[in-house]
Structure formats: C-alpha cells, structure tokens
Amino acid sequence: MIFSYEKLSDRYLEVNSCGTQQLCDRNYRRHRKDGRCDWHILYITKGRSYLTEKGEKLVAEKGDIVIYAPFEEQCYGFLGADRSVSNYIHFSGTGVEELMKACGLFGKRKVTAGDSPQLESIFAKMRDEYILKKENHIEAAAAYLMQFLVIAGRCAAKTADPSPDSARSIDAVCRMIHDRTCEPLTVKECADFCHLSLSRFEHIFKDKMGVSPKNYINKVKVTVACDLISESDLTVRQAAEAVGITDCNYFSRLVKKYTGFSPSYFKER
C-alpha cells in the first residue's frame, strides 16, 4: 500500500517525510516485505537497531545509517532496553540514484558515519522545514537532504579509511596550494608538509584528488593567472610572475595545456 507520504516525486529530489522516533522503553519492529516505493534512511543517534537481511542478523549502532532502496524488503526493530533514537527520512526524485552513487551510498545497506554533530544539525534543519512548512519548504528540505547525503558519504569514507596520512593531510595541502599561488611551490615541499615520502604523497594525492599533485598545482596557478589577465590590467608576464612563474614561454605552454588557449585569449575577452 502507498500512503500519502510515500510517493515518487518528479522533482530532482524531494523529502516525502522525515522525523525522529524516540523509542523510550518500548520494543518496536517493522517488516515491509515489499518495501516502499521511495528511498528510506534510518540514522541512529542513540542505542541501536536490529536488522534482518536475507536471514542474517545485523546490528546498526549509534552513528550508523541504514539505507533501503525502493521496493527492497525492510525488516528492522528496536529493543526498549536500548532506549534508542532513530531519525528517519523517506525521499524520492529523478536524481536520487545519481546522487546516491556520487555520495558513495548506492547499493549499501549500512554505513558508519560516526559521531557527527554536523549531520545531526543538518537533519534537525531538514526536519524543521518538513514540519513547519514555511515558504519554499520543499526546496529547502531537499537542499538539506542533499547536504545530509554528501556529509554522510564523506563521514562514511573517512570512517572506512581513517589513516592519518590520507584525508586530513591532503585537504590541508590543497588549502596550502591555493593559499600560496604566488610562490614557486614544489611537489617535494607538499610531501614534506604532509610528513610523507615523495612517492607515497604522490600516490595518496592522486588517489584522493584524481590528478597528480604537479598537475593540481599547475592548474590552480593557471586558473588564478588567467583570472588576473582577464579581470585586471596586468600583462601576461606580470600575471605569470604573480603566480610564481618567471619563464613566460613555460607559462604560455601551461595555459595552452590546461585551457586550450594562449594567454592573450584571456586578455582579449
């Protein structure tokens, strides 16, 4: 049976319903053999949920997110002794599958986001939009849901790979590259900043960012320099020097490589 809040939206993303279940000391069990027509998320913020998945017993602890795709059998419950708190979201839309894949959540039954005040805050704002129904609440709730899915995916990826030489180090070095565009920064300096060997740094950086650190540095410099050429009265040589490149011919080759145009193209725009 499809209830009023269980629907397939023709929007890109829409929250059909959401809320918080505080189970207190009650046992609770839900079994939907044919699932729902929309997506269903359970975000456990206290206690735990007990799932049955193809005859196998699973436990979703605090900080876990349980995901059911449309028409998947749902069998889960809570024990009163755990005094669990579960936040639920039912949602649909033409872009949900694409979004779930982009966030690394597609095809997963359970992911671990861990203790995340940010996720809890986003959920609370989304729930307020759904409950209070102020102007443009549908769009606002969808925006918070998109944030929730993105942050959930990031938290789950971080939990799955908590090594100290990965996410935080690479995030920090990317900020440094953007902050120091005026300097002739080398890949070796970036590796030293992360306390990694050059080869290890290059491997981790490319795995996370999809490009080599040298290409990333050069692309950032080219982007900043081309903006200077286009938006200021700096000459091509001055713009190149502003991003730490003193060889004008080398700079021209970089611009051509990353944009397909010569530097003068940006001055003439």
Image (cartoon, rainbow, N blue to C red):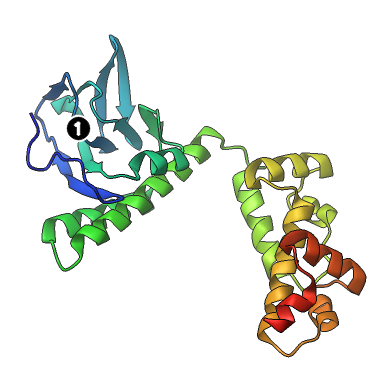
Looking at the picture, does residue 26 appear above or below residue 104?
A: above
Q: Give me the residue at 24% from left, 50% from top.
A: 14
Q: Quadrant of residue 232?
A: bottom right
| Outermost bottom residue | 233
- Is residue 247 in sight in this rendering? no
Q: In the rendering, at what x and y percent does residue 204 appear?
A: 70, 41
Instruction: List x then y, in percent, for residue 124.
Output: 24, 54
Query: Which residue matches tag 1?
Result: 37
Q: Quadrant of the N terminus?
A: top left
What is the secondary structure assignment of the residue under circle 1? loop
Residue at the spot 70% in from the left edge and 72% down from the top edge: 224
Q: Quadrant of the C terminus?
A: bottom right
Question: Farthest residue toward the top?
Answer: 55
Residue sitting nearer the eye, 152 or 209 = 209
Viewer-nearest residue: 164 or 236: 236
- Image coordinates of residue 101 in percent, x first then y, are 44, 38
In which quadrant of the rendered view does residue 173 lie? bottom right
Q: Is residue 86 rendered to the left or right of residue 122?
A: left
Q: Residue at x 14, y 66 (%)?
A: 134
Is residue 265 left or right of 126 when viewed as pictured? right
Task: Please give the name of the residue rendered at 64% of the width and 48% of the height, measured from the top-left corner.
Answer: 209
Left or right of 249 in this view: 40: left
Q: Characterize the local packing of mark 1: few (<14), some (14-19) or many (20 or more) Cα atoms within 10 angstroms.
A: some
**Relative height, residue 246 to residue 217 (above, below):** below
| Left or right of 168 in this view: 73 | left
- Residue 212, image x, y percentages: 75, 48
Query: The disc labelled 1 sits on which kind of residue?
Result: Cys
**Residue 19 or residue 68, whichever sits in front:** 68
Residue 245 higher or lower than 127, as above or below? below
